[in-house]
């Protein structure tokens, strides 16, 4: 049983329950990138942040994507089928956050056996990536400026893993063909969808760099203008690409014409006349041809009698969330005042981020000490650095995973290791959660990194390429677990999570947000498990993030609620500079008794998400 909540941690915005409108598909054969047109949208959709019922559920940031996934469930498809269809639709309506030019992490719980497996579909560095000089300008020998040079470049493009993730998931667990599951998204791309404020603002925010890439400008800035809110946006180039992948499977993407199109675009970005430097990249057809996903067991932590399943390396999500929870389990959070809980979460998060920077990287290249990081004795020793009377000055030193015994004594930390690790992760990722009538659950986070990725659309193909390689440490250091190497995957913070009780799902959730994903997921789990919040209330609550930095960044509502209580502890608080003043955009599903579920999306952040159940009861 979860501990019942004593008092609310945050105010919860009111939610509106609205229904989706019917769909009337219309095929369009034009293969060229289209201009958005200001005519009534073919689909008028509304958003529902919370829904309760049985028979399965889908929750995502977008109502079109949720609708498509829900139809798969309604027609007898399973959770993996619906997750692939939903993700493909997000590639249409959320192209600046996710798409087939990027990668991600998928977690699946088998409803029959309770077994959890993960798919690591993270992008990888090209095989000819130089180690020490990857991010140095060959003309000067100096590091490229992060913005705009690296952000908008072929150099930052990693080998995409999303299509391979879909293929692997469907071959292992799917009941429908790739062709069947991509068809609704292809139709959505052809027919068009209504541009919302978030879509329009994301184009406007990237207009300067989009305008200097010919293929990108043609798709997103026809006549130099961003699409207007309420207009219809069509992408027949992406529809054509989906059709081809549907017919031929993942090999259509990783071999042949699409692969050649990708490589040509990376090596010679279609730059128009202008002042934007767009360094070319190292990707080769061989990198695409030899790319493969990794299927692995999750990192699993026992937390207050529940099993918390997180994503292992190459993501740091599971280990960092798990380590923070291991530290917090040593504290009686349920009996503490709310401000003490907030203080404890901030301190535990900083400790876990210190160890993340010191130890976590791609496990195929780095020996990641997951067992030590989640060890109760190690958590006891790290807890020695936490004072419940005051905040410890940041940044904190990493702990010593080689020598620990759970006792507080001098030398328990690796002195001199305190460093604010480079954090170039962008917030524009997306997360979806699906469950089906058989109790199988999928929690899936996918991304192209920066808002708009590398800013480069593959000509005629309708999708943006990632700039995921900027997640590597940009300064090469021999002992850095996140230094760039050929074939290596950059450290991620994506944290798809499933919590079970004796093998039965209790909650599944995740969020976008770069490195704030970790603190968002951590906060949701503490609110849900320790404080007895409903998932709906936990997702709606204001957020803050402490990533072993001097400052705690927070949403305005969080500062209003907690500044007076937490500044006396010595925490340095400031308003986040993230877009919209928002941290994360979570989605999740809470599992009730019997087969009843509550699907939850954001009520406000990023314009609100959309959550639907098959049978509303």
Image (cartoon, rainbow, N blue to C red):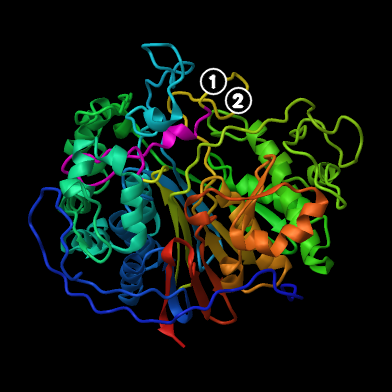
Residue name at image x 36 percent, y 33 percent: 157
Category of crowding for the residue at label 2, using alpha-carbon neighbours closer than 10 angstroms: few (below 14), some (14–19), many (at least 20):
some
Q: CA distance from mark 1 to mark 2?
A: 8 Å
Residue name at image x 75 percent, y 73 percent: 3
Residue name at image x 35 percent, y 51 percent: 202
Where residue 359 sits: x, y (%)? 65, 33
Instruction: Please name the residue that numbered disc 1 is placed on.
Output: 476
Check the picture and name the quadrant holding the N terminus: bottom right
Instruction: Please name the residue that numbered disc 2 is placed on.
Output: 480
Identify the residue at the far left of this view: 29
Q: Nearer the viewer, residue 337 or 497?
A: 337
Q: Magenta stretch: give its range.
A: 452-473
Q: Is residue 587 above or below residue 474?
A: below
Q: Can residue 457 be found in the magenta stretch?
A: yes
Discs 1, 2 touching: Cβ within 8 Å: yes
Overall secondary structure of the magenta stretch? Answer: loop
Label disc, if present, on residue 441 of the rendered structure? none
Left or right: 542 in relation to 283: right
Where residue 381 sits: x, y (%)? 84, 42
């Amino acid at each position: 049983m979860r501990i019942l909540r004593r008092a609310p941690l945050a105010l919860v915005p009111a939610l509106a329950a609205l229904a989706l409108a019917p769909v009337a598909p219309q095929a369009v054969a034009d293969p060229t990138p289209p201009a958005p047109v200001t005519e009534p949208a073919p689909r008028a959709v509304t958003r529902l942040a919370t829904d309760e019922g049985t028979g399965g559920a889908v929750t995502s940031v977008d109502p079109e994507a949720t609708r498509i996934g829900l139809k798969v469930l309604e027609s007898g498809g399973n959770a993996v089928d619906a997750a692939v269809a939903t993700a493909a639709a997000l590639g249409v309506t959320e192209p600046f956050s996710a798409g087939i030019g990027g990668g991600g992490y998928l977690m699946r719980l088998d409803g029959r056996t309770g077994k959890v497996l993960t798919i690591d579909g993270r992008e990888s560095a090209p095989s000819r990536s130089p180690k020490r000089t990857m991010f140095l300008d060959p003309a000067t020998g100096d590091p490229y400026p992060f913005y705009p040079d690296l952000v908008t470049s072929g150099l930052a493009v990693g080998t995409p893993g999303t299509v391979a993730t879909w293929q692997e998931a469907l071959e292992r667990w799917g009941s429908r063909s790739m062709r069947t599951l991509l068809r609704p998204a292809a139709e959505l791309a052809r027919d068009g969808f209504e541009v919302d404020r978030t879509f329009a603002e994301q184009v406007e925010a990237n207009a300067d760099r989009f305008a200097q890439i010919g293929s990108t400008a043609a798709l997103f800035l026809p006549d130099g203008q961003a699409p207007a809110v309420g207009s219809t946006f069509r992408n027949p180039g992406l529809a054509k690409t989906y059709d081809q992948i549907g017919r031929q499977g993942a090999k259509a993407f990783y071999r042949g014409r699409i692969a050649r199109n990708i490589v040509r675009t990376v090596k010679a970005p279609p730059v128009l006349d202008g002042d934007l430097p767009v360094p070319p990249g190292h990707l080769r057809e061989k990198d695409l041809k030899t790319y493969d996903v990794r299927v692995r067991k999750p990192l699993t932590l026992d937390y207050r009698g529940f099993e918390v399943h997180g994503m292992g390396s190459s993501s740091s999500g599971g280990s960092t969330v798990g380590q923070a929870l291991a530290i917090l389990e040593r504290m009686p959070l349920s009996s503490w005042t709310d401000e003490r809980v907030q203080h404890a979460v901030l301190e535990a998060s900083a400790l876990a981020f210190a160890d993340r920077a010191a130890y976590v990287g791609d496990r195929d290249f780095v020996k990641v000490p997951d067992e030590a990081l989640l060890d109760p004795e190690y958590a006891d020793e790290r807890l020695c650095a936490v004072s419940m009377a005051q905040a410890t000055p940041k940044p904190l030193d990493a702990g010593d995973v080689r020598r620990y015994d759970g006792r507080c004594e001098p030398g328990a930390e690796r002195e001199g290791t305190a460093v604010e690790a480079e954090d170039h992760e962008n917030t524009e990722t997306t997360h979806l959660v699906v469950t089906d009538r058989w109790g199988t659950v999928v929690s899936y986070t996918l991304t192209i990194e920066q808002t708009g990725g590398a800013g480069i659309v593959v000509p005629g193909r309708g999708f943006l390429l990632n700039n995921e390689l900027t997640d590597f440490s940009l300064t090469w250091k021999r002992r850095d677990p996140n230094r760039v190497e050929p074939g290596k995957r950059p450290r991620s913070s994506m944290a798809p999570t499933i919590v079970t009780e004796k093998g039965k799902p209790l909650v599944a959730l995740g969020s976008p947000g770069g490195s704030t994903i970790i603190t968002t997921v951590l906060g949701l789990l503490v609110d849900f498990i320790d404080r007895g919040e409903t998932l709906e209330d936990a997702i709606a609550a204001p957020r803050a993030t402490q990533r072993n930095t001097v400052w705690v960044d927070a949403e305005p509502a969080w500062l209003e609620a907690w500044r007076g209580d937490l500044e006396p502890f010595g925490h340095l608080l400031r308003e986040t500079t993230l877009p919209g003043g928002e941290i994360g955009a979570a989605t999740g599903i809470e599992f009730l008794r019997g087969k009843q579920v509550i699907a939850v999306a954001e009520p406000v952040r990023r314009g609100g998400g959309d959550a639907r159940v098959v049978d509303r009861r």
